[in-house]
Image (cartoon, helix red, strand yellow):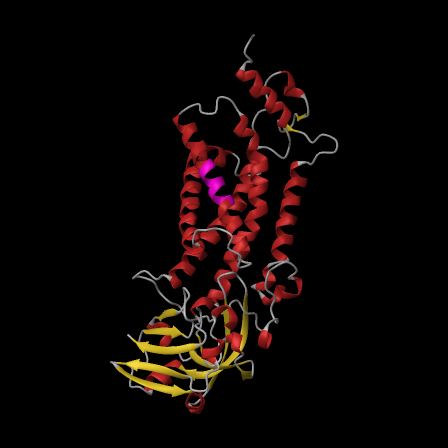
Amino acid sequence: MQRPDPQKLTDALAARFASPTRSTRLTVVLGRWLGLSFTVCFLTGLFSHGLQNPPSWMFFPTSPVWIYQLTQGLHVTAGIAAIPLLLAKLWSVYPELLKWPPVKSVAHALERASIALFIAASLVQLTTGLINTYKWYPWPFPFRETHFWMAWVIWGSLLLHIAVKLPAIMAHWRRRAIEEPAPAGPAAGAGVDAKHSTPAAAPGRWSRRAFITGVGVSTAALVVTTAGQSFSWLGPLNLFAPRKMGTGPQSVPVNRTAADAKVAGFARAVDWSLTVTHHGTSRKFSLNELRAFPQSSQELPIACVEGWSQTARWRGVPMRDLLGAVGAPPDSALRVTSLEPEGAYRLMSMPAEYTRDERTLVALELNGTVLDLDHGYPARIIAPGRPGVLQTKWLQSVEVL
């Protein structure tokens, strides 16, 4: 029995999948959009990770107060936008995976390895990242650490893929670039636009322009109907995001409730007090004593790593005033402990940049009323430009380092 000719099979597949929605030019266009979204995700993700796990050189900006609200909103929004862009790019290139032979040279093997790694890592990253916004963790591995290192894998494989495909990218970067030649063989003239040497749209099939428009509209619609959890001006259009502004106790959403943290009994205790330690000397402040301090009101956002945020009015004791009451410098680094019996964020470190800022409060009120239990009653931290997970609720102690 005669073996099929691999070249004929390749030509047959090329003719079978020939379409205006599959071309090098289209792939480059989609790649630009996808590369931009991944770049935004990567850079904003590094910033968020640095705030939570700071290296020695990390800087901690407190102005503008909405800096983390912006960067993390962009991080999640760009990640959501990348989902339809990645799927569209896969649609435009997947026939390339069927070409024979699978590996033609060392450079070709490197190209295939880079794209396989990029696709696999991207699908895992976007899927788990989207699920994380709903605070659902059906996997056995730690999300934050995996998300961080997977980002480096994606970025590295993306740079490698760009380096390998750079000649094709440069040749098709501009709109008037010369398109790839029509397929050779008997099918060469079928369904091909002679002017541009690219497959023409058959009746009932999309043109390249219609496909790009459809991808753009779908991506924009997805962004517009979810970004309202991060950006108030899009709030009325927030249809599908897991959090909505203006909801929850005191009209502010909540991620971790008092019941989840198992702190209700400790927080409601009549003898609750906040312990402040400096140079081995501790002083306890009751709730009434904290209320006796001069109170400060600040408009500050609570911005969570899952992407949602909301600006609210907080009222309480400026942290530097509280430190002054125990003789500690106003620019002290702190270790803050929550009443939570366990949890990854039970202990929180606060760099001096936040401590010295007059807008950093031991908050006792939210939006004009006493803190709700789910918002951290009897006292919590609120500081400008910090991730929500570091705005410790249900305070137990503050230690000057």
Q: Which contiguous range is marked in magenta?
A: 116-123
Q: Residue 45: which quarter of the image? A: bottom left
Left or right, 200 with reference to 317: right
Up the image or down, 353 lies above or below 28; here it is: below
Location of residue 42 in the rendering, given as x and y in whole percent from the top left corner: 44, 52
Q: Residue at x 56, y 13 (%)?
A: 4
Q: Nearer the viewer, residue 264 or 199?
A: 264
Location of residue 228 in the rendering, given as x and y in whole percent from the top left corner: 60, 63
Location of residue 74 in the rendering, given as x and y in whole percent from the top left corner: 52, 58
Up the image or down, 207 lies above or below 318; here it is: above
Left or right, 153 with reference to 299: left
Q: Residue 204: which quarter of the image? A: top right
Up the image or down, 125 lies above or below 55; here it is: above
Left or right, 79 with reference to 354: right
Q: Quadrant of the C terminus?
A: bottom left
Q: Residue furthest right?
A: 203
Q: Residue at x 58, y 35 (%)?
A: 92
Q: Residue furthest left?
A: 279
